[in-house]
Image (cartoon, rainbow, N blue to C red):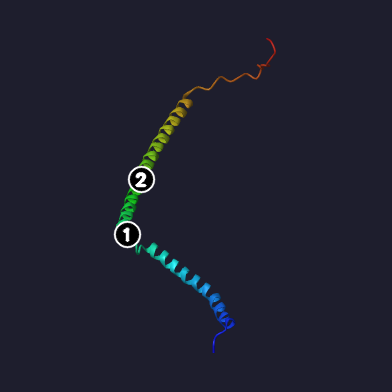
């Protein structure tokens, strides 16, 4: 019994319809596996990986050094501000002590009234 063209088409069309999504699923899976391998470093040059790791370590040391330097400057700045505040407090105390030693101005007589803009 020979297979007719219509019978062959009725077999090939559904196969082609299902083959397209299956092919897409397989290629998508292979792409995801390649991405995972790249993230994990599988299949990459180990010398490049070691260089990247050493550069990362050097950057971490530099950041730590900068953090220590900024902390030292911050502490120095705080100490300078506290010294300035202490000096200002001493100056305020000294000025208030000299102000209390000054004599009060003479009291005015209520009989004498000065009107601005009026002569004599």
SS type, badge 1: loop
For the residues carrying marks 1 and 2, which lies nearer the camera in this image?
1
The mark that comes first in sequence, 1 or 2, is: 1
Q: Residue furthest top?
A: 120
Query: Residue 14 location in percent, x, y?
Result: 56, 78
Between 85 and 45, the one nearer to me in the picture: 45
At x 69%, y 10%, the residue is 119
Where is mark 2, residue-wise?
A: 66
The disc placed on residue 45 is 1
Q: Residue furthest front?
A: 2
Query: Residue 79 location in percent, x, y?
Result: 38, 39
Q: Quadrant of residue 50?
A: bottom left
Whether residue 22 sits left or right of residue 79 in the image: it is right
At x 42%, y 68%, the residue is 33
Q: Residues within 10 Å of mark 2 (few under 14, many from 20)?
A: few
Q: Quadrant of residue 76?
A: top left
At x 43%, y 33%, the residue is 89
Quadrant into which the N terminus falls:
bottom right
Q: Compared with residue 90, is residue 119 higher up or lower down, i.e. above or below?
A: above
SS type, badge 2: helix
Between 90 and 99, the one nearer to me in the picture: 90
Quadrant into which the C terminus falls:
top right
Q: Compared with residue 59, is residue 118 higher up or lower down, i.e. above or below?
A: above
Whether residue 87 sits left or right of residue 15 in the image: it is left
Query: Residue 92 location in percent, x, y?
Result: 45, 31
Q: Compared with residue 114, is residue 47 higher up or lower down, i.e. above or below?
A: below
Between 53 and 2, the one nearer to me in the picture: 2
């Amino acid at each position: 019994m020979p297979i007719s063209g219509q019978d062959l088409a009725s077999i090939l069309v559904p196969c082609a319809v299902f083959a397209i999504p299956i092919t897409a699923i397989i290629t998508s899976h292979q792409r995801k596996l390649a991405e995972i391998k790249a993230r994990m470093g599988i299949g990459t040059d180990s010398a490049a990986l070691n260089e990247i790791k050493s550069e990362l370590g050097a950057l971490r040391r530099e950041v730590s050094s900068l953090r220590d330097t900024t902390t030292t400057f911050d502490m120095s700045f705080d100490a300078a501000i506290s010294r300035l505040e202490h000096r200002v407090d001493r100056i305020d105390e000294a000025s208030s002590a000299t102000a209390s030693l000054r004599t009060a101005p003479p009291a005015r007589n209520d009989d004498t009234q000065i009107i601005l803009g009026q002569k004599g």
